[in-house]
């Protein structure tokens, strides 16, 4: 019988790993709490009403239609029994494995700020993005009928915390949504009351980028009307406003959290060693110490290279996923496994329409050229699984090839499904 | 000052009325509980994962961008004060009018079957359709891991109540979704256990159509594997099954209700006369008796023509909406208003891919020809406001003209927006 491989998580790492294991002499089971893979780099476009959820979410089962040795299951992993080599799920399943790949990803990190966690809107998964999109439109509808100027101003004030790529891209897209689109929809509103405040604890926009690119991004954001505040933290929040470390209190009805993520907690805490950042400790072959058949990849794994942990980003996760797939095939053949090494492909972030910053090796791009680099790379990656370009044609396509792109478990909406 | 017109409801009737009043010497305020107009004839395609919600929902504000005298407000109308000529909303507004157009539409009619209402999934608005889409995919995921054959069969049994156009179109689309798409996604499932049961109290599929077209629709549905039961009613329902008037009990986890609608109750009951079907009584000029400045149109209005009430369908509502707009303009000029007369444009329903039945005047169409008629007419009507064809290009369009199609208040639930 073929060895059983369980992959926990269908994000960038898990999906790449399972894809690489397709048609190999192993039985693969992918488990995810959602039935779709999410192209998270474009999540901010869903949150800013530019894309539909189905444009950036692809059913996992459809990705493995041609792979007879890969199965999928929707499920919430509640624990791992390393002694019996079983994965437990919330549905009561105990699923046996010979090799386990933990690719459970990350979640919003509120750094213990409970009041912020209670009112902030995240940008980490699809329901978050849809909630944020809806919230912004509701804010405008409410502002349009609010007669008190201070209350109206609070509905038109949007505080975005975190000037990493997610915060920068969302702040830019929100500015364009408001000034290019909503301005036409709400002629009764005086949009000079609109404020988008981008808050960053560090002293640079896009702290992971070279300073000159961070400065370029900041200037472009400010030109778009974004109020950039560096070296400032959010201390406290209510439904009606936030208190900043600068002492200022800002009345706002929308607080967007893009200030950081932390690894998911899949295996019961305390059992496995964690790095200082809370990620699972792994060796040079991405295996969990003491568990030679258990791998951890992506955001959840603290992969150390040249003395530093790799960033929690999709290129790292994808390379790790492909590496682990090759490693498992080697192990099943009794062959040795060489150490993992991440090859840096660069980083980038877009700032509104037609401008972006990108750092690829020693080359840096900005402005329209940076945006072109961003566009080409994203189109390349999205077409890698199925994307907007395909969705454009999906309706006609469906009439020719009997396919339907949209079958996502994003949860229902106003009406909760009571049948479950 | 220009006379104030309030239009309650942005469905087919209300939207047509407001559009006709654009640039006329009146001030128009449209109120709807949603911020979008919904192209309900294609709702079954959202429910069967073929279209995205934004493909059939269009923001009302965007429809009136160029109309300076038409404003919009999201709101739930809680009552009408006819004495003071004010519309009251759940937000506490009291909005004055000189002319009022009640176009509040209809809602699912469960005919007092409380147990059915508790478990049935509707097909009347956008959240319903999204809930149903999600539910069907969940049913397949659950069936895929269910080991008890009887329990699995219940998850794969779909009971659709009502063989009018909505029930017929959904049953056909569901059959295709399952056999053409999900069959490939769930190779581990034996789809011979799948049952789609279409239940109709009357003795014909599509009772409003000529008998030969109903028979054609029935045969096509049966060829697609739909189990059609005529002259049967649902008596009772639980989460695990339904009891039919034939005495049969059917184990099922999905019960779809398309058996009828009833008018919404906007004005406080008892104050205004209702027809036997519960619709608002109106005279030949669609005005509410005793209220010469209050009109009712669409599903909520019982418009009698040739001794019968007009059906609750969009063509009727649209014609009524345009008529009322003209009537209001005449009234503001002190001119007389002629009686309304509906011109029948025919009825149609599609049955899966490439087949439909249509009755236009004395002509009847079926099969592929009927489907072509259906397609042309729907494309014509959708392009009438903005539609899938436009959405295909919306992403590119957005980069040229700064527009964003997707800004719908469909609400969210997994993560309820707590900021409201």
Image (cartoon, coloured by chain):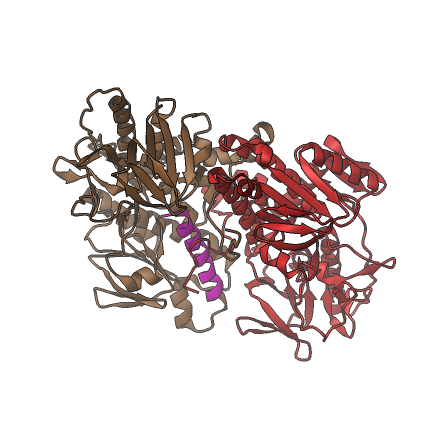
Chain colours: A red, B brown
Q: Position of residue B309 (x, y in %)?
A: 18, 40
Q: Which quadrant, please, contains the N terminus of chain A? A: bottom right
A207 sits left or right of B396 in the view: right
Total numbered badges shown on the rendered structure: 0
Residue reaching furthest to the bottom: A83
Q: Which of B51 and B418 is in front in this view?
A: B418
Instruction: Answer above or below: position of B114 versus A93.
Output: above
Q: Which of B18 and B234 is in front in this view?
A: B18
Examine the rendering and report whether any part of residue A141 can be seen. Answer: yes
| The image quarter in which residue A25 lies | bottom right
Examine the rendering and report whether any part of residue B353 can be seen. Answer: no
Q: Position of residue B123 (x, y in %)?
A: 36, 50
Q: Where is residue B187 in the image (x, y as percent from the top left)?
A: 51, 61
Q: What stretch is highlighted in magenta?
A: B125-143
**Most common secondary structure along the magenta stretch:** helix
Residue reaching furthest to the left: B307
Q: Which of B299 and B189 is in front in this view?
A: B299
Q: Which quadrant, please, contains the C terminus of chain A? A: bottom left
B174 sits left or right of A55 in the view: left
Q: Is residue B129 magenta?
A: yes
| Residue at point 35%, 30% (across, down) | B18
| Residue at point 12%, 38% (across, down) | B307
Q: Position of residue B348 (x, y in %)?
A: 28, 39
A52 sits left or right of A83 in the view: left
| The image quarter in which residue A275 lies | bottom right
B134 sits left or right of A347 in the view: left
Instruction: Answer above or below: position of A248 versus B242.
Output: above
| Residue at point 49%, 52% (across, down) | B412
Q: Which of B312 and A72 is in front in this view?
A: B312
Q: Does the magenta stretch include residue B131?
A: yes
């Amino acid at each position: 019988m073929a060895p059983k491989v369980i992959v926990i998580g269908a994000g960038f790492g898990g999906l790449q790993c399972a894809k690489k294991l397709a048609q190999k002499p192993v039985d693969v089971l992918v488990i995810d709490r959602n039935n779709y893979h999410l192209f998270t780099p474009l999540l901010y476009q869903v949150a800013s009403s530019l894309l539909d959820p189905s444009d950036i979410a692809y059913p996992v089962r459809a990705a493995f239609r041609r792979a007879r040795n890969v199965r999928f299951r929707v499920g919430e992993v509640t624990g791992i029994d390393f002694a019996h080599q079983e994965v437990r799920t919330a549905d009561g399943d105990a699923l046996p494995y010979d090799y386990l790949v933990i690719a459970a990803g990350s979640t919003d990190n509120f750094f213990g700020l409970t009041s912020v966690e209670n009112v902030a809107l995240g940008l980490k998964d699809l329901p978050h993005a849809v909630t944020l999109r809806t919230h912004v439109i509701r804010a405008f509808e409410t502002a349009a009928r609010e007669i008190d100027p201070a209350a109206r101003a609070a509905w038109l004030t949007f505080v975005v915390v975190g000037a990493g790529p997610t915060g920068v891209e969302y702040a830019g897209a929100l500015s364009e949504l408001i000034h290019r689109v909503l301005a036409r929809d709400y002629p009764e509103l005086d949009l000079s009351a609109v404020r988008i405040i981008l808050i960053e604890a560090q002293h640079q926009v896009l702290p992971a980028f070279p300073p000159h690119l961070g400065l370029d991004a900041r200037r472009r954001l400010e030109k778009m009307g974004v109020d950039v505040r560096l070296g400032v933290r959010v201390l406290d929040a209510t439904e009606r406003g936030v208190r900043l470390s600068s002492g200022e209190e800002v009345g706002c009805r929308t607080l967007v959290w893009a200030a950081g993520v932390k690894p998911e907690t899949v295996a019961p805490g305390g059992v496995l060693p964690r790095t200082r950042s809370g990620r699972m400790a792994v060796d040079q072959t991405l295996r969990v110490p003491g568990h030679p058949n258990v791998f951890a990849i992506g955001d959840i794994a603290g992969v150390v290279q040249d003395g530093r942990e790799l960033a929690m980003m999709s290129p790292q996760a994808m390379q790790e996923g492909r590496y682990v797939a090759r490693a498992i095939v080697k192990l099943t053949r009794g062959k040795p496994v060489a150490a993992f090494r991440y090859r840096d492909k660069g980083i980038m972030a877009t700032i509104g329409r037609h401008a972006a910053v990108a750092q690829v090796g020693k080359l840096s791009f900005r402005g329209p050229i940076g945006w072109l680099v961003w566009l080409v790379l994203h189109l390349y990656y999205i077409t890698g699984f199925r994307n907007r370009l395909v969705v454009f044609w999906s309706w006609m396509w469906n009439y020719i090839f009997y396919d339907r792109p949209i079958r996502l478990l994003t949860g229902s909406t106003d009406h909760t499904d009571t049948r479950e």
